[in-house]
Image (spheres, rainbow, N blue to C red):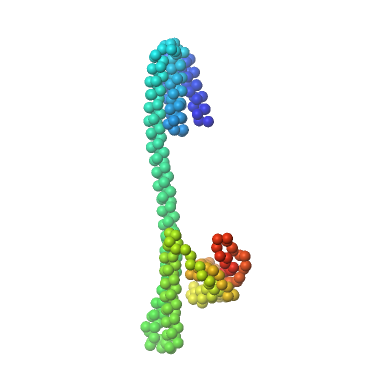
Amino acid sequence: MLMAVSLLLLLAIWTLDVFTGPRVAPSLFYLLPVLLVTWRLGLVAGVTVAFLSSVAWVSGDVMDHLYPARSWITVWDVTARFILLTVVALLHATIRGKVQRERNSAAHSAALAIRCLEANDMKDTLLHAISHDLKNPITAILGSAKSLRRREQLQLTRESEEALLEGIVGRAEKLNRLIDDLLDFQRLDRGVIAPDRRPTDLGAIARRLVAEADYLARHPTRVVADPVEAWVDGPKVERILENLLRNAAKHTLPGTPILVRVEECPGAWSCPWRMRVPAFLTT
């Protein structure tokens, strides 16, 4: 389409050239189709139009009887004007290439800036989530340790001390699992490790998480869990369920009951390249 428009423009310039005569001939206008085609279609198309423009330019001079059609001047003029228009097309193509590279560089920089902003937002979100997840077990460990340090003032019984020690051990193990999960997520993202799928009792995971969840203190929580064994990565499933429970506690009014249901559901999820997981969790 652009080539057709350029040829029509060339024809219009040639017509003006023939009818205006040699003294007012718009010779420089032959540059217009060359510049237009070179800028939009590239150097090869520009050189092609440069040749056609040279022939049209010289034919206009011949029709104005400036020199005979078979004269050596005709050949010289065609050659000289073609070289001139080709040089113009080459310079124009060079400018076009530089402008295009600048545009591509600017677009690439803009895309990198957007990705950096997204990565920064993701980092902030991840740091917030990590700090929230790590703070709870650390707070519980500190509280139990301070109580043990004041055991004489508080007159703790042997059973109370054992319970506090068990709480410290449990929270420390949970903290260790959280750190391992963070390291695993990083390795998974780089493709270093694969999920460690093992037979896991999903009901036991749900009951244990609810029992340890201090953030559910203001929500009456009930667990309906049959012994359901699935071939999954236990720590990852535990992390998913914990996030669901935290969201349920965070986005509901205090006193809102929460139901955790773990039941077998044959055919709920199957893939030809994965082992079937015949269970689901709902909150």
Residue at image position (42%, 56%) is: 119
Q: How many marks?
A: 0
Up/down of 49 relative to 156, above or below: above
Residue at image position (48%, 23%) is: 10
Task: Pick out the residue farthest to the right.
Answer: 266
Up/down of 245 relative to 154, above or below: above
Where does the image place residue 11, in percent across and percent down from the top left? Answer: 50, 21
> To which quarter of the image does residue 248 belong?
bottom right
Where does the image place residue 15, in percent across and percent down from the top left? Answer: 49, 18
Q: Is residue 127 left or right of residue 224?
A: left
Of 265 and 6, which appears nearest the observer? 265
Q: Say whether residue 266 is visible.
A: yes
Where does the image place residue 88, in percent across and percent down from the top left? Answer: 39, 27
Residue at image position (56%, 72%) is: 229
> To which quarter of the image does residue 219 belong?
bottom right
Of 251 and 200, which appears nearest the observer? 200
| Quarter placement of the C terminus | bottom right
Q: Say whether residue 238 is visible.
A: no
Q: Is residue 113 left or right of residue 264?
A: left
Where does the image place residue 183, in percent across and percent down from the top left? Answer: 42, 65
Residue at image position (40%, 82%) is: 147
